[in-house]
Amino acid sequence: MPTLDELRKSRLEKLKKLSDRGVTAYPPETGEKIAVVEARKKDGNTVTIAGRIMAIRGHGKIFFLDLRDTTDRMQVVCKADVMEASSFSLIELFDMGDFIAVTGEVGKTQAGEVSVFGKTARLLSKSLRPLPNEWSGLTDVEDRYRQRYVDLVMNKDVKKVFETRAKVITFLRNFLNKDGFMEVETPVLQPLYGGASAKPFVTHHNALDCDLYLRIAVELYLKRLIVGGFEKVYEIGKDFRNEGMSRQHNPEFTMLEFYWAYATYEDLMNYTEKMISSLIKEIKGTTKISYQGTELDFAPPWPRISYRDAVLEHTGIDIQIADDEKKLLAAIKEKNIKLDTNDAIGYGALLDAMYKVAVRPKLIGPLYLTKRPTAFVTLAKRLPEDPRFTASFQLLVMGEELLNAYNELNDPQDQAARWRESEELGKRGQEEFESFDADYIRALEYGMPPTAGWGMGIDRLLTILEDQKSIKDVILFPTLRPEQQ
């Protein structure tokens, strides 16, 4: 079997032969053409189609090319007694992967296959690197992510995933626009990161001579707009978190966040059911989908369970009794829950770590987890009946958080106190904590109406919709370690 270098050398030799004949291997224009899917309907008519050669068969006086564009695939029959001699002589210099344009009459072969019987052929782009074998394809997972351009050519199902992604984003945008939400853009480079507990990426602005951060969330800027008088705003954009990578985490990811003045988290639960069930029905034709062998039904209403009840059910620990760090640690040891507590500094971090190990994986859903503890929901409004918990919910599917929402904390004094508590935990050694944002507190002091806010990871939603194991399978170019040349 020839090596890659040998195959490239052969194609470079063909490129030279084309040049010697005066054929431009990379012409500036394609000319008029029609899509392959339309050409297939033009029986008896002369058409011009263009696309990538996916297979070449034959020799001597007849060749068969499989030509593919973004709409479909079509056979091209090249016969020496039909095709112009100048075009037919080029066939031997074509390779799988080349882009060509072919003009000819649409008809059927003796085998009944709809084909273009070529009269002329033009090279549009010479491929110097051979595509993988079409039957074995591009199988190495990291190669697929790194060379997504080849992955899309060789694996049809991959292309469908990203077509679905585009449809999902369009649907969500239209859904919110229809209900009076306004799409806005907020800074990606921020003087102070906020809106979540996460480690940021840091960069330096030379002209200002200051460090800036890639945003970890858009929340605080969108709520500044609520202060400014907008009542319904949303943003679809990239967030960046300098954290570990896993099947469900990529350092760069896409979020949809919206904020709705005068709404409550109960309103958002109803709105979310309507939005997500309508989306899945639109994309899949049904509210029932299968994910990794488990059937999920997104037809509303969805079950609702409080955070306290979920923890009690799956661990036997009542967090209204184990309500501080010392008591919770004792309860974890008593229940023999295996948990690495080294990085869990403070009650909220310890509780969250236990929940993620012992509770969340058992919550299949779709279901709402409500009333999350104030200890680790820094930006949410407390419940009046029990300030240890917040007016909040998460949508959980297959043990993963799909979206997060709550009544926004609009009391500037309470917000300031919670951020100071978070910074104290950072001083104690907690890696991920929220920093005090004086400008945001100033904004709240001007007054923010009661508001409910909502944030969903688009990538994680796509893994569920498209039955993909890893978030990298729904990101066109996921973050990877630099390739060693």
Image (cartoon, rainbow, N blue to C red):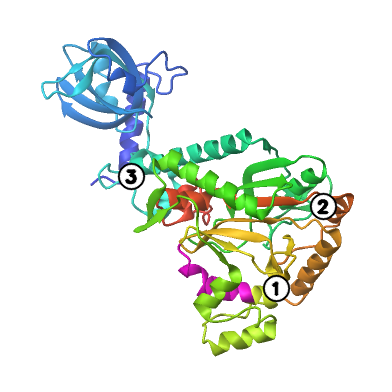
Vertical position of residue 286 compared to residue 119: above or below: below
- When asked about the image quadrant of residue 232, the answer is top right
| Left or right position of 359 against 431 | left
Give coordinates of residue 317: x percent, y percent.
57, 81
- Which residue is at 48% across, 51% downward? 300
Residue denoted by label 1: 430
Residue denoted by label 3: 4
- As drawn, which residue projects farthest toward the left? 110
The first of marks 2 and 1 along the sequence is: 2
- Which residue is at 54% across, 44% downward? 275
Viewer-closest of 103 and 106: 106
- Rate crowding at label 1 as few (under 14), some (14 to 19) or many (20 or more) other CA atoms within 10 Å: some
Residue range highlighted in magenta: 351-364
- Which residue is at 70% across, 81% downward? 324
Give coordinates of residue 126: x percent, y percent.
38, 28
Asked if the residue under mark 3 is in contact with the one under mark 2, i.e. CB atoms within 8 Å, the reply is no
Vertical position of residue 117 compared to residue 189: above or below: above
The first of marks 2 and 3 along the sequence is: 3
Residue denoted by label 2: 210
Give coordinates of residue 3: x percent, y percent.
30, 46
User: How far apart, in angstroms, are the residues tagged by discs 3 and 1?
Assistant: 50 Å
Q: In front of the other: label 2 or label 1?
A: 1
Magenta part, dominant SS = helix
Asked if the residue under mark 1 is in contact with the one under mark 3, i.e. CB atoms within 8 Å, the reply is no
The amino acid marked with disc number 3 is Leu
